[in-house]
């Protein structure tokens, strides 16, 4: 079979490949500590599960509007306005199955072949994959350890050309746990407004913040109509398998994304959207407890990594990933990630799984128990001693 030429430009997520290899080793009797997958190890809160069951029993098993349940979209708009300081309405919201469709369809709707998209590197690999897929030109901007894995705004200015169509930002960030400061966002906004550039702001870790306040670029004057806020329920509410996300943007683009939804999925699952209403309108106690536990785990893994010779690790300000520098071990990141899995029994990801500027780093997801994190640290320490 001959696949389309564009398919060759499509990337993947290494996390799922590492998970598959880890499962294979487990089937052979090996004990593996899983620190590779970015998935909260908590159950979805009961009131959300109950809402889904009630919706099923109430007949929410049919097609719904491609843009999403109007009541749900109104709740999302209210939530975004409250948490980001914006003034979006229902027509600015489109509901999709998970967060990735907003990346895919947002880029597809706005980026023509040859258009340039500036994106964070190391960063979520689907950004570069989708830019390549549509025929755009990926323009990576390094996230620098020396400034807490923020981007250098002066370098951003230098990367902008008359072909720059979009800038992608992600804060709190995967894989580094870095957080953009308000001054960073103001500087990015100035660049975007001056050069008429759309900003895609990927914000699924907005609630998983250990210090400071989350700021969204959409709240800055002049950015409401040129920002795409991307969010989902996977992280804050431990709902990865529910596949529920949304985009908030100008009404014209929201309608375009809804048209993609019509052509691709018809609609997002109806009873899952009712669960989403319960999530946003209900108690946040379980989510708050989850963040507190993540913070405890963060401190355990960072302190433990810094105690291993050859490894140094900044303390992430958000998300649930540690991104240690491993250059002093003498190994490149792919070799060391493989050794961690095959020899130490610890599944993690090479920094280059997130782009070329990830060389010299590993990513550990601390969505696992403190007991297992300590076990992983002991195994890696023994392997490198």
Image: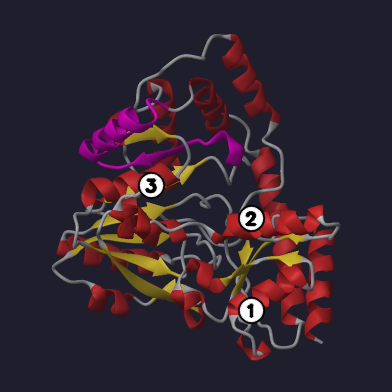
Q: Where 367 sits versus 234, above or below?
A: below
**Quadrant of residue 78 within the rendered picture:** top left
Q: Position of residue 317 (x, y in %)?
A: 58, 65
Report if the CB atoms under discs 3 and 2 are less than 8 Å apart: no
Q: Position of residue 249 (x, y in %)?
A: 29, 42
Q: Which residues are magenta?
A: 239-267
Q: Where 53 sits versus 263, above or below?
A: above
Which tag is nearer the camera, tag 3 or tag 2? Answer: 3
The CA span between labels 1 and 2 is 19 Å
Secondary structure state at the residue bearing disc 1:
helix
Residue visible at 67% across and 39% down in the picture: 285
Q: Check disc 2 and report the residue beneath it.
A: 37
Please tell me how many numbered marks the rendered image carries: 3
Q: Check disc 3 and report the residue beneath it.
A: 1
The CA span between labels 3 and 1 is 34 Å
Earlier sequence position, callout 1 versus callout 2: 2
State yes or no: residue 31 in magenta. no
Earlier sequence position, callout 3 versus callout 1: 3
Earlier sequence position, callout 3 versus callout 2: 3
Q: Residues within 10 Å of mark 2 (few under 14, many from 20)?
A: many
Q: How is the image coloured?
A: secondary structure
Residue 175 marker: none
Q: Check disc 1 and report the residue beneath it.
A: 335
């Amino acid at each position: 079979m001959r696949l389309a030429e564009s398919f060759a430009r499509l990337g993947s997520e290494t996390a799922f490949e590492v998970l598959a290899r880890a499962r294979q080793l487990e089937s052979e009797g090996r004990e593996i500590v899983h620190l590779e997958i970015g998935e909260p190890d908590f159950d979805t809160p009961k009131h959300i599960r109950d809402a889904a069951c009630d919706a099923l029993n109430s007949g929410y098993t049919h097609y719904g509007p491609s843009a999403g349940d109007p009541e749900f979209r109104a709740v999302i708009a209210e939530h975004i306005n409250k948490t980001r300081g914006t003034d979006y309405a229902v027509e600015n919201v489109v509901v999709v199955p998970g967060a990735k469709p907003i990346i895919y369809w947002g880029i597809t709707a706005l980026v023509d072949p040859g258009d340039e998209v500036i994106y964070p590197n190391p960063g979520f690999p689907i950004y570069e994959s989708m830019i390549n897929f549509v025929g755009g030109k990926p323009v990576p901007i390094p996230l620098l350890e020396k400034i807490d894995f923020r981007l250098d705004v002066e370098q951003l200015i230098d990367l902008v050309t008359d072909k720059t169509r979009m800038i992608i930002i992600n804060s709190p960030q995967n894989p580094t746990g870095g957080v953009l400061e308000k001054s960073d966002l103001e500087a990015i906004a100035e660049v975007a407004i001056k050069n008429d550039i759309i900003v895609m702001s990927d914000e699924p870790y907005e609630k998983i913040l250990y210090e400071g306040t989350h700021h969204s670029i959409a709240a800055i004057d002049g950015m409401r109509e040129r920002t795409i806020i991307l969010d989902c329920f996977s992280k804050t509410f431990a709902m990865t398998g529910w596949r529920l996300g949304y985009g908030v943007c100008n009404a014209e683009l929201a309608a375009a994304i809804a048209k993609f939804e019509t052509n691709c999925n018809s609609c997002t699952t109806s009873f899952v959207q009712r669960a989403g209403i319960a999530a946003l309108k209900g108690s946040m106690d379980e989510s708050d407890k989850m963040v507190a536990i993540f913070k405890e785990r963060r401190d355990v893994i960072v302190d433990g990594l810094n105690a291993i010779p050859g490894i140094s690790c900044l303390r992430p300000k958000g998300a649930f990933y540690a991104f240690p520098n491993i250059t002093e071990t003498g190994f490149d990141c792919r070799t060391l990630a493989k050794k961690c899995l095959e020899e130490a029994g610890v599944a993690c990801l090479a920094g280059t799984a997130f782009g070329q500027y990830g060389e010299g780093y590993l990513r550990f997801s601390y969505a696992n128990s403190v007991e297992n994190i300590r076990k992983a640290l002991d195994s890696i320490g023994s392997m490198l001693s």
